[in-house]
Amino acid sequence: MDSKIGPFVKWAGGKNQLIDRLKARLPESYARYYEPFIGGGALFLDLQPNRAVINDNNEQLLNIYRQLKADAEAVIDAVNILDAEPCNKERYLAMRESYNNKIAANELDAQCAALMIWINKHCFNGLYRVNSKGLFNVPYNNKTCGVSIDADNLRNIGIFFRSNDIDIRQGDFEVACSDVSSGDFVYFDSPYIPISETANFTDYTKDGFSLEDHKRLARLFRHLDSIGAQIMLSNHNVPLVHSLYEGYEIETVDVRRAINRDASKRVGTEVIITNYRE
Ligand SMILES: C[S@@+](CC[C@H](N)C(=O)[O-])C[C@H]1O[C@@H](n2cnc3c(N)ncnc32)[C@H](O)[C@@H]1O
């Protein structure tokens, strides 16, 4: 497919900034492309692989990919209706309630996808956070936003999904990788290990990814390596990552970080780890 496509939501850890450096480190060739923490899918949508497995444990996010595959026009029409009325705090809260009603009723349809896209554009920092009942609770960003979508991008994503062999899964990363074979390529972009020394990592389990999850991921990396898969992984440049992936190719890359009051903390380093050499 010739049309350029890209992420349709702002997503924590979105890889737009690192894309060229990730692309420079891809293996020369591979059978299937696996991305078990797909999020906004920056690398996947840029590469447009012919055979792929994408996965995430966020059911609502996966619903958007599924709805775009099934009928992108239905999602576009529903977002256009939401965009037709200007937003203010009252309207934002009403739409958030409609979205939460969809979640509570488990109605994963085009309207639910449209609401999530619209809310992502109007909520604070594009964050995705749910309460203990699984209901979305991010406040309004207090901005007058323009349109919430690039309709052609959504259309072209739908076409890309329908004209290629793309398996959309939902669940834990380890399960999603159960049929990886020799020659496949897997890109792991899990929630990162916190850099802040004050972050209490053992408590970082509620919506996030625990220390045990990071250890489980490192074991999976070593297992997939042993069966002949080609693997790339990104994370913060912190000592724990170096010890978990000892023995593999670990390259550090400079990145700009989200606004920090301390200017010296606006540049950081991340790592790109591979089990092969480019
Ligand atoms: C850093 S983000 C991926 C960002 C993505 N590469 C992009 O460009 O937008 C990590 C993703 O992992 C998902 N996630 C968290 N825990 C997971 C788990 N146990 N299994 C699968 N996905 C998980 C989150 O929902 C989130 O979308």
Image: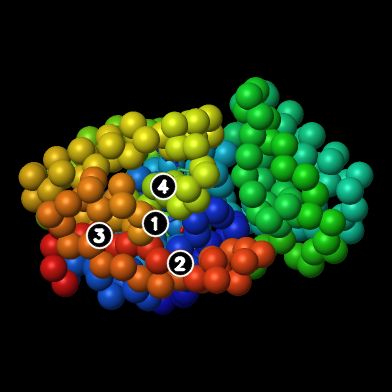
Location of mark 2 (residue): 268
- What percent of the width, then of the height, locates residue 257? 54, 66
Helix, strand or loop at disc 2? strand
Q: Earlier in the sequence, mark 4 or mark 2?
A: 4
Q: Could you say which quadrant of the image residue 234 lies in? A: bottom left
Of residue 184 and residue 154, the one placed in the foreground of this image is 184
126 sits left or right of 269 in the view: right
Locate the C terminus and report the quarter of the image it occupies: bottom left
Q: Earlier in the sequence, mark 4 or mark 1?
A: 4
Q: Earlier in the sequence, mark 4 or mark 3?
A: 4
Say which mark, if any, is on residue 193.
4
Determine whether label 2 and label 1 are within 8 Å by CB. Answer: yes
User: Mark 2, residues whose alpha carbon is within 10 Å: few (<14), some, or many (≥20)?
Assistant: some
Location of mark 3 (residue): 273
- What percent of the width, then of the height, locates residue 164? 34, 57
Q: Earlier in the sequence, mark 2 or mark 1?
A: 1
User: Mark 3, residues whose alpha carbon is within 10 Å: few (<14), some, or many (≥20)?
Assistant: many
7 sits left or right of 1 in the view: right
- What percent of the width, then of the height, locates residue 220? 21, 39
Residue shown at the point (60%, 71%) measured from the top left: 263
The answer for how far apart the CA atoms under marks 4 and 1 are is 6 Å
Say which mark, if any, is on residue 236.
1
Give the amino acid at mark 1.
Answer: His
Locate the N terminus and report the quarter of the image it occupies: bottom left
Helix, strand or loop at disc 3? strand
Q: Could you say which quadrant of the image residue 139 lies in? A: top right
- What percent of the width, then of the height, locates residue 70? 51, 47
Q: Is residue 101 above or below residue 141?
A: above
